[in-house]
Image: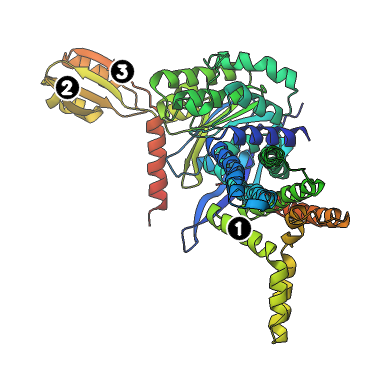
């Protein structure tokens, strides 16, 4: 366990000191803060605009960072050989993969945490009450980032950074649009094609379950199962992806 | 007590698929080596010979296609085998934003050392490699030579039994190379096993107790350094004053005669007794200016081994 935590701590330290990551974080904060400017244009819809724009920024920047970090973490270490002094020590490859992922998750937690604090502060500054459902929406957004990061790490374990990034982004877009895609598939008349499309979509995660921003914006009640079921479903996905990533990485030659 | 070899490589094969057409490139073919504890072993070969591939197999970064590689009796792919070794990659590069002490703490913890022990060792090893223990700059601001030093510092941290260095002297200035040479000798004196690859033969010659020559993935010669050098004798060189001896038919039957400026150089073939030639010199009244038998260098031994290999593989 201590080796996993050591890899996680160094990954986190490297990420939060990285100037590109810092710049992305600052840009994200500026975008969240711009919700106040947009609210000026919205007249009596100020609360809705701040919530909509704010949660969108938290989610979009978080997912972007998850893909960027997930794809680059291992590739960069292989390319620069920094990985060699790590894996030449008594550490198993799966420990390295899990440690890297935990470091990445910690970085995402900091980024999402800072943006969430900024969003809540904006609401308070603008004189609105902070709905409890916002907490759930932000928690689910963070979990979605973790899931996308796990996909990025998984794709990066066997393909190039560019392809891994594209695959991870594609998974996010399709995962968010899954209910719509299911509706479209229902219109397909050829049974064989319909069945194979359904099977294809069944492999992908339904990320729309992690999007509770509409409920938060409109003060809609969020039943407990709308939180714990996706969390359970996401955790299973996450474990499967990490296991597969570690398995593939353990068999890889580091040339 | 029956002691396991520090390194044991048996019939290792390794190939890679390269390029768009995925052509098979054979990196190692039937490689076998055994290195005993306490040896300073030089792994010599030209670029592309397979030195780094062998080292990567030993430290668990690559898996052999066939054969076995063991470290102190354990399969190299087993993480436990790496508890007793440390590795310096060729031209190392480390984490940009970590400071030296943070990087060494990271390495020490990965080696399984308790935090307190790593903390105590960091100033020691930094001082040993000539870096300021209070250095606060991140590693991305380090020069190539300083990175090599921090790379060596991470190998010293856990005080392992086996040190594996891949081209430890490449990219270093003469002072840096001298420092690495002294360090390897110090490790040898402390009873550690050092396995290092190099194509800087003069420096390898100065530190190794045993060497192996590698070419195109095959060992083409190996043995104790002194034995290899002895086995490659050079002609005895006798320098005579003036040109008179050049036309002596008795002398030319005993040695090769070559002009050397205004003087004459006699080359008595390697392994041949120079006594008869000296007797003839004395009888002819020629004056000896100098006489020497230069010992073969590792470079000459290596080049001869390469020539021999080329001769064997020629159709």
Numbered disc 1: secondary structure: helix
Mark 2 or 1, which is nearer the eye? 1
Output the chain of dot 1: A
Up/down of A166 relative to A99, above or below: below
Which residue has dot 3 on it? B292
Q: Tell me where residue B170 appears, x and y as whole percent.
A: 44, 30
> Is A220 placed left or right of B278 in the picture?
right
In the rendered structure, find residue B270 and report the number of the disc placed on it: none
- Residue at 71% x, 84% y is A192
Residue B138, position as x, y percentages in the image: 54, 25
- Asked if one can make out residue B76 in the rendered structure from this viewpoint, the answer is no
Going by the image, does B140 lie left or right of B264? right
Which residue is under mark 1?
Answer: A169
Q: Hey, which residue is sitting farthest bottom in the picture?
A: A190
Q: Which residue is pictured at 41% across the width and 33% down the height?
A: B301
Q: CA distance from mark 1 to mark 3?
A: 74 Å
Position of the C terminus of chain B, as image quadrant, is bottom left
Give the alpha-carbon distance from disc 2 to disc 1, as whole Å.
80 Å
């Amino acid at each position: 366990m201590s080796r996993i935590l050591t890899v996680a701590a160094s990954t986190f330290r490297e990420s939060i000191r990285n100037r590109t990551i810092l710049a992305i974080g600052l840009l994200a904060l500026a975008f969240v803060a711009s919700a106040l400017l947009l609210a000026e244009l919205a007249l009596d819809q100020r609360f809705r605009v701040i919530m909509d724009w704010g949660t969108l920024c938290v989610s979009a920047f978080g997912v972007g960072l998850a893909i960027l970090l997930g794809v680059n973490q291992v590739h960069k270490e292989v390319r620069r050989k920094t990985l060699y002094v790590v894996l030449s020590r008594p550490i198993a490859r799966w420990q390295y993969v899990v440690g890297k992922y935990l470091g990445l998750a910690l970085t995402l937690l900091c980024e999402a945490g800072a943006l969430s604090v900024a969003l809540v502060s904006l609401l308070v500054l603008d004189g609105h009450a902070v709905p409890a459902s916002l907490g759930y929406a932000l928690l689910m957004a963070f979990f979605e980032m973790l899931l996308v990061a796990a996909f990025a790490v998984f794709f990066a374990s066997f393909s190039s950074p560019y392809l891994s990034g594209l695959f991870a982004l594609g998974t996010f877009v399709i995962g968010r649009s899954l209910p719509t895609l299911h509706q479209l598939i229902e219109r397909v008349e050829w049974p064989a094609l319909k069945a194979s499309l359904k099977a294809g979509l069944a492999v992908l995660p339904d990320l729309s379950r992690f999007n509770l921003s509409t409920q938060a914006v409109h003060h809609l009640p969020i039943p407990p199962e709308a939180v714990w079921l996706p969390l359970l479903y996401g955790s299973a996905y996450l474990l499967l992806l990490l296991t597969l990533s570690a398995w593939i990485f353990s068999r890889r030659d580091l040339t | 007590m029956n002691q396991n070899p520090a390194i044991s490589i048996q019939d290792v094969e390794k190939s890679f698929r390269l390029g768009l057409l995925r052509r098979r490139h054979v990196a190692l073919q039937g490689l076998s080596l055994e290195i005993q504890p306490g040896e300073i072993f030089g792994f010599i070969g030209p670029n592309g010979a397979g030195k780094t591939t062998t080292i990567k197999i030993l430290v668990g970064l690559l898996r052999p296609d066939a054969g076995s590689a063991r470290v102190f009796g354990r399969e190299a792919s087993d993480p436990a085998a790496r508890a007793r070794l440390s590795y310096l990659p060729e031209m190392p590069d480390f984490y940009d934003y970590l400071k030296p002490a943070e990087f060494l703490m990271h390495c020490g913890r990965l080696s399984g050392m308790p935090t307190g022990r790593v903390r105590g060792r960091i100033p020691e090893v930094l001082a040993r490699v000539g870096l300021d223990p209070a250095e606060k700059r991140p590693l991305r601001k380090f020069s190539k030579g300083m990175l090599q030093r921090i790379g060596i510092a991470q190998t010293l941290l856990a005080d392992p039994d086996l040190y594996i260095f891949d081209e430890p002297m490449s990219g270093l200035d003469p002072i840096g190379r001298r420092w690495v040479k002294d360090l390897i000798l110090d490790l040898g004196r402390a009873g550690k096993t050092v396995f290092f690859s190099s194509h800087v033969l003069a420096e390898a010659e100065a530190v190794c107790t045993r060497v192996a020559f590698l070419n195109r993935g095959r060992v083409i010669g190996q043995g104790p350094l002194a034995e290899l050098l002895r086995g490659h004798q050079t002609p005895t060189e006798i320098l005579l004053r003036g040109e008179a001896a050049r036309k002596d038919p008795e002398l030319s039957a005993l040695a090769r005669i070559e002009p050397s400026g205004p003087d004459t150089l006699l080359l008595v073939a390697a392994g041949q007794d120079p006594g008869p030639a000296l007797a003839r010199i004395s009888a002819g009244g020629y004056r000896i200016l100098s006489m020497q038998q230069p010992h073969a260098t590792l470079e000459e031994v290596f080049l001869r081994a390469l020539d021999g290999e080329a001769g064997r593989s020629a159709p």
